[in-house]
Amino acid sequence: MGTEVISASNSGISRALLEWYEANHRDLPWRRNPEPYRVWISEIMLQQTRVETVIPYFERFLDRFPTLSDLAAASEDEVLTLWSGLGYYRRARSLLAGAKTVIEHHDGVFPRNYEAALEIPGVGPYTAAAILSVAYGEPWPVLDGNVERVLTRILRLADNPRKAATKKYLKEIAGGWMPRGKASSFNQAMMELGALICVPVSPSCAACPVHDACAAAEHGDPENFPKLPPRRKTVAVELEAGIIRRGKRYLLERNEDLDYLEGLWGFPLARPDSGGIAFRLRKKLATSIEEGAELKAIRHSITFRRLTLRPRILEAGSFSTRGKPSFRWGRAEELGNVLPVSSLCLKIADRLS
């Protein structure tokens, strides 16, 4: 399966990589005390999210839930509120469920056993390997996007690294390079190299500690690897948001219709092709709704969706939220501080301010 790296060079690759990591790694908060709970939180937050974005969320989360027991005792709303704006909210729900599982079935200690780790909600093969290697030093190679890129370039591997057979092969290669007793540093070095040097576009090959062992660098075509399938096509989504105000409070709705915003509070939303937000709220609130000014449109991306959202000021007749648990009134300063909301909701609030 592609070009093999000569086994005699493996120790040289590992040594050069570890020396580079020791001298150049970033000072990240979860690295200062890499115990299982902190590593777990960081790995879940870092999924499809930039390090710079994660750092303040990680620090706030650990301030509020310093131990796994604290997290397990929290409500979903408390967890989602701290997660507001970070996106991919299923991660937060799985993290809470996982914390409860560890308390109930593992005496509050994240298991060192790989199979047991995989039984925890939200923990897949990559996350299990990352926690066990970084926190416990167990020799499990990790394979995230950064490591995939490093390995496929070194090997100049033409196979799709997301295929099961290729993934297994790459794990075997990484495991063969991993020095005994150095699982934590080695895995973090591989990820750090992909994040800082072996980046997707214009990699800094001259600064790479394993440049001499890299087949793609030798051929001058590192940007041709990895060979990934085409990305999922983006989908355009049109939405309207209704802004109903009473004094300093706004009408908010807990989303139950859009799976990518499920369970989060925000300004009521509707698709224009379903009649629009005024039509929807007339039915939901059983009152008159008059359309006012339309604010500047907001562009927002959620995974493969490209949203165009048009906030509209609405004038509503008399109504009550009593008996309507999916509706409530809230102040702008409560969004993301008291109530769990998405970054889309925060963008609308910025428009209002």
Image: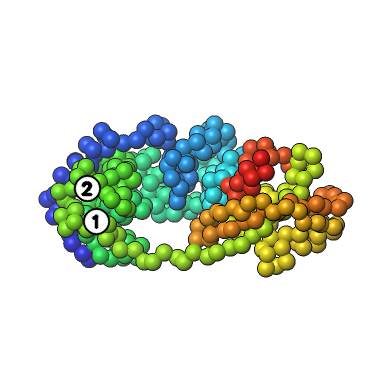
Quick one: label 2, few (<14), some, or many (20+) residues within 10 Å? some
Give the residue displayed 46% in from the left and 48% down from the top: 49
Q: Which mark is residue 7?
A: none
C-alpha gap between disc 1 and disc 2: 9 Å
Asked if residue 124 lies left or right of residue 352, the reply is left
* 160 up-or-down from 82: above or below: below
Q: Which residue is mark 1?
A: 222
> Which amino acid, mark 1?
Pro
Residue 183 visible somewhere in the drawing: no
Q: Helix or strand or loop: what does disc 2 sit on?
A: helix
Residue 141 lies, in percent from the top left, at 31, 50
Give the residue displayed 59% in from the left and 44% down from the top: 84
Residue 300 lies, in percent from the top left, at 55, 54
* 32 up-or-down from 297: above or below: above
Q: Where is residue 260, by image quadrant?
A: bottom right
Give the residue displayed 53% in from the left and 55% down from the top: 301
> Which amino acid, mark 2?
Cys
Q: Nearer the viewer, residue 187 or 339?
A: 339
Residue 316 lies, in percent from the top left, at 82, 52
Q: Which residue is mark 2?
A: 205
